[in-house]
Amino acid sequence: MRNQFTDSPTDVQSKLRSAKSLCLDLLLPKAEILDICDQIGHEYRDRIYNPMIVVWMFITQVLSKDHSCQQAVTRLNARRVAHGLAKVSSLTTAYCKARCRLPEELFEQLLAWTSCRCEQVTNESWLFHDRIVEMVDGWTVMMADSDENQKEYPQMTGQKRGCGFPIARMIGVFSLATGAINHTAIGPYKGKQTGETSLLRTVIDRILPGRILLADRYYANFWLLAAGEMRGIDLVARAHHLRKVDFRRGLKQGYLDQVVGYLKPQRPKWMSEEEYAKFPSLILVRHLKYKVEQKGFRSREITLATTLLKAEAYPAEDLASLYGRRWNVELHIRSLKTQMQMDHLRCKSPQMVRKEIHCHMIGYNLVRAAMLASALKFKMNPSQLSFTGAMQAIEEFASSLRVGAGRRDQQWDSLLEIISELRVGNRPGQQEKREIKRRPKTYRLMTCPRNPNRNRYATAA
């Protein structure tokens, strides 16, 4: 990544306007939502809870500290009263039914729209050798314990019925330059074709040719390396732990830098014969090894596997530095699960769970857009800015925008300035144990469903 900004002042102003438009389009009810509904053929009636209002309420709901539907309805009433309109009922029934009526495709299109808008704001100095890098990784989420959720996303098999929560596995494809999430896939936690690599295969066609995919060693198998090569995508990952790497063989390109061939394995059970025939019988993969030395820590040797074969164009030092930034994807996932509270979802049906997930990611991209605008304006790198601080600042400024306080341009400029001041600390190599000081409450763990317990205690009383 280069440190100098290469965009002209005109380009910077254009990108700032694009980021501002994206944030205001989602912080306030905008007609773009209705345009997407028309594109996907979703019919609706123009009433209080129309798609434009419901999507706005849903996004602001996941961005707030309190994710309850009650606060979302109260927020709508505050806005209506501020604009001289009559308030609606404080009951959440109408809002919840309106959310159910919206199609999942609407939220998928909105996520793609926000990721595209974030990419348009990208500065060339944030790229790797003038190429866009995307990072992939997986995580799990839990959801409300309902029969519908249990049927599609069963709980862990070691838990008793009624004592656990439905759990799903997800992957996300994030942009290294902007931090925005571009693609996502979700499936059951356990079962055939539910692993991270299987989920990646469902969205790999959406990754544009010419991009670089950054991943951990779990993804460095023949099928993903070959699939990326067939689609014009290069993969940079740590070599798979089951593959023996011998630097005495292969085409030497430097010290501990070689090009070897991966032979096509036997056809796996999940792959059809037609799909198997499309894969080449041999692919070329570059292996390189480097040592990570840090004061106070033991030295580590890391071996990378990549389809970026040319050592002149992509030196080993640059690839080692690129892989070192893969940890950013872990920080982005932490922002989604911890700061945005996506680790445990509230909705009670699989369709609504997927909508809730997409709303979290749309809201996440909205925060990223504001961070990008701030980084562009003050000539910084987005990774220097605090996601939590930006999300808190957006929530506070959004309240004044909703009530129509005026001076929107001045408020936007102040928001960007505040975000630029909320930076993350420079703590290279910091390592802390996963331990907590505050002791948890010593309640017994649930070993049987709660309803039988209630009946038993009532009988005993």
Image: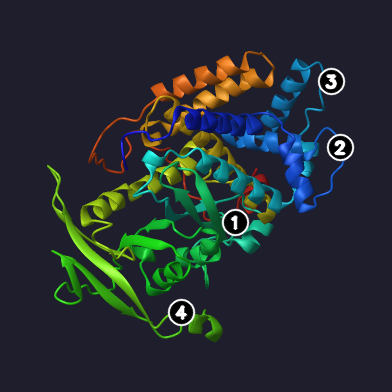
Mark 4 to mark 2 CA distance (whole Å): 51 Å
Q: Which mark is residue 162?
A: 1
Q: Earlier in the sequence, mark 1 or mark 3?
A: 3
Residue matched to label 2 = 46
Q: Is 128 situated left or right of 92 in this image? A: left
Q: Secondary structure at mark 1?
A: loop
Nearer the observer: mark 2 or 3; the answer is 2
Residue 370 visible in the picture: no
Q: Hey, what amino acid is under mark 4? A: Phe
Q: Hey, what amino acid is under mark 1? A: Gly
Q: Residue at x 24, y 59 (%)?
A: 312
Q: Earlier in the sequence, mark 4 or mark 2?
A: 2
Query: x and y percent of residue 137 in the render?
Result: 43, 55
Residue matched to label 4 = 279
Residue matched to label 3 = 86
Q: Residues within 10 Å of mark 3 (few under 14, many from 20)?
A: few
Above or below residue 117? Residue 255 is below
Nearer the observer: mark 1 or 4; the answer is 4
Q: Earlier in the sequence, mark 4 or mark 3?
A: 3
Q: Quadrant of the C terminus?
A: top right
Q: Secondary structure at mark 4?
A: loop
Above or below residue 73? Residue 203 is below
Residue 382, image quadrant: top left
